[in-house]
Structures are given as structure tokens and as C-alpha cells.
Amino acid sequence: MTDDTLLELPPLYKSLTWLTPLSEERAAHLVAFLSDPAPAEVLDMGCGWGELLLRVLASAPQARGRGVDSASASIDRARQQALTRGLLNRATFDLMPGVEAQDRPADAVICIGASQIWGPSVEDAQPLDYAAALHALRALVLPGGRLVYGEAIWSATPHPAAIAPLAGRDDEYLTADALREQIRAAGFEVVDDDHASVLEWDVFEAGYRDRFTRWLEAHDVDHPAADQVRRQYEEQRAAYEEGYRGVLGMAYFCLRG
Ligand SMILES: C[S@@+](CC[C@H](N)C(=O)[O-])C[C@H]1O[C@@H](n2cnc3c(N)ncnc32)[C@H](O)[C@@H]1O
């Protein structure tokens, strides 16, 4: 057993642009949807390090933005990026649980990969509560406003090797069709929707594993934690390449409230 304190992996933002499988092309489409016509207020629930929110603010120069996330390292990074890009006067980043941020609806809202804000945490290995998330998001989108909702789905029928490294259950996610029904039932109009390609997933997963590679490059081969890091890299690679690749998907919906 290796002491976890020996393990300080490089932050994910060093290897990833987003904490979700998302190409530059798709990101540009989402930014365009949110910023034209220009919104007054942009809200990003579970914003990570705020990359998409900051791009919307850059594209809509009159808009103000608020990002909410419960991870302090991500919020620190978001504030630093807002400063670097000259956007700190229009962007605030709040370190708090998302459920406590229901107070300020906006006309452009983002929620990508963060439905767990309104349901059981990922560690509980429960099915994702899309309905609770969509209900809460409905209240956060001003009438006529826009929402970019991105969430995990099953892209193919989940099989044992795919679900084993996830929550171990085939009801963890919905198909895109079933999710679209829930979205409509929550009162949103679907303007367009699409899902991440396997290439977007490959890039995301490679970036996710990159922190293990970076750590190994920065440390002696006989460092006490090196075996553990190599094992984590291999577990992550196998979980994806021999497990959920092509089965776990990510759907992106452009919605109107
Ligand atoms: C999959 S990441 C997506 C981040 C970002 N939306 C993106 O696309 O890059 C999910 C984010 O939700 C945040 N999160 C998870 N549970 C949360 C909660 N209860 N309250 C606020 N943020 C939460 C995590 O810290 C993480 O940054």
C-alpha cells in the first residue's frame, strides 16, 4: 500500500481543455449558440476551470458571467484564467455546492457533466438523476433563455466489461433518445443535439491519463509511488479501451427555455 500523500498528480487542466470530451469545433458551436444573440447573464453550473464560460464572455462583450463549482483547485484556475484574459471584471467564480446556487437565474446557462449537483454524488454509484437536474435547471433559465446541457449517456447497449469500471450497473445512464424525452418533459425546446465522437473521447481519455505519464516522467523509476502510478495508468487505459469505449457517450443539447 502506498501513501497517497506521496502522490501529487499534475492538475488535469495541464492536459485537458475541458473536463469533458469536447472538440474545438463543437465548443465553438456551443459558444455561438450561447452568445448570439448576446446574453446579459451567463451561468455555468459545475463550471470546472471555466473555459467555456470564459469563451462565451469573450464572444459576448456586454455579458456578465458566474461560474459555480465545488472544487477549489478548479475555481482558483478559473479566476486566474479570467484575470489573464482580462475578464475578471465580468466574471465571478463561486466555490460552493451547486444546490446552494439556485438564487440567480440567467438568460444563458451551461451545465456540462454536472447533473450530480442535484442528485447522488458520483461516489454513491447511483443512476444519474437527470430529471432532478433538468427540473433545477429549468428554474435557472430565464423565460426564453438558452441552456447548453451536456451529460453522459449510453451510446450503445452497456455490457459487463463497460459497466465494471463505472458504477457496475446498466441503469447508470439513459440513451440519448430517453434523455431527450426527459428534456422535453422538463419544459425545454430542443434546438439541436449531438453527441461526442469516439475521437473526442479518445482525446479526452488520453488527456486524462496524461497526468500519470507526466508524473512518471518527473520522478525516479524507483520512487515509492511509481508502481502505483503505473498501475493507475494501466487501469484507466484498460477501463476505457477494453471497457466503456463506444458505450459511454456524452450528449450535448442546445435548449431553449
Ligand atoms: C465532468 S466535470 C465538468 C466540468 C465542466 N463543466 C467542463 O465541461 O469542463 C463536473 C464538474 O462538476 C463539479 N461538481 C460536481 N459536484 C458538484 C456539486 N455538488 N456542486 C458544484 N460543482 C460540482 C466538479 O467539481 C466538476 O468540476
Image (cartoon, rainbow, N blue to C red):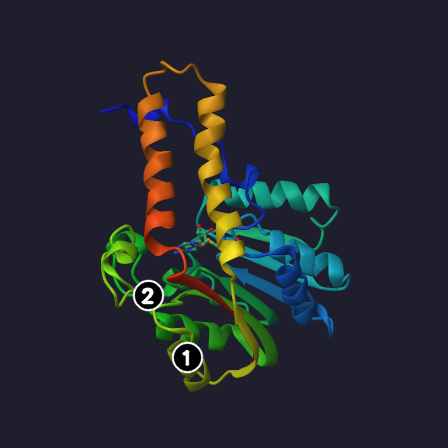
Image check: 101 left or right of 23?
left
Asked if residue 48 shows in the view, the reply is yes
Image check: 51 left or right of 245?
right
Image check: 51 left or right of 249?
right
Q: Nearer the viewer, residue 92 or 216?
A: 216
Q: Secondary structure at mark 1?
A: helix
Residue 147's x, y, as percent?
56, 72
- Using the numbered discs, state the Cα–Cα distance from disc 2 to disc 1 in whole angstroms: 15 Å
Badge 2 is on which residue?
128
Q: Residue at x 51, y 62 (%)?
A: 196
Circle 1 Cα neighbour tier, 10 Å, few/some/many (<14 / 14–19 / ≥20): few
Mark 2: amino acid: Leu
Q: Earlier in the sequence, mark 2 or mark 1?
A: 2
Residue 150's x, y, as percent?
49, 66
Asked if residue 253 shows in the view, the reply is no
Residue 223's x, y, as percent?
36, 15
Q: Residue at x 30, y 56 (%)?
A: 162
Nearest-to-viewer mark from 2 and 1: 1
Image check: 163 left or right of 155?
left
Mark 1: amino acid: Asp
Q: Quadrant of ligand 1?
A: bottom left
Q: Residue at x 73, y 72 (%)?
A: 36
Q: Nearer the viewer, residue 219 or 109?
A: 219
Vertical comparison of 203 with 25: above or below: above
- Residue farthest to the right, as pictured: 61
Badge 1 is on which residue?
177
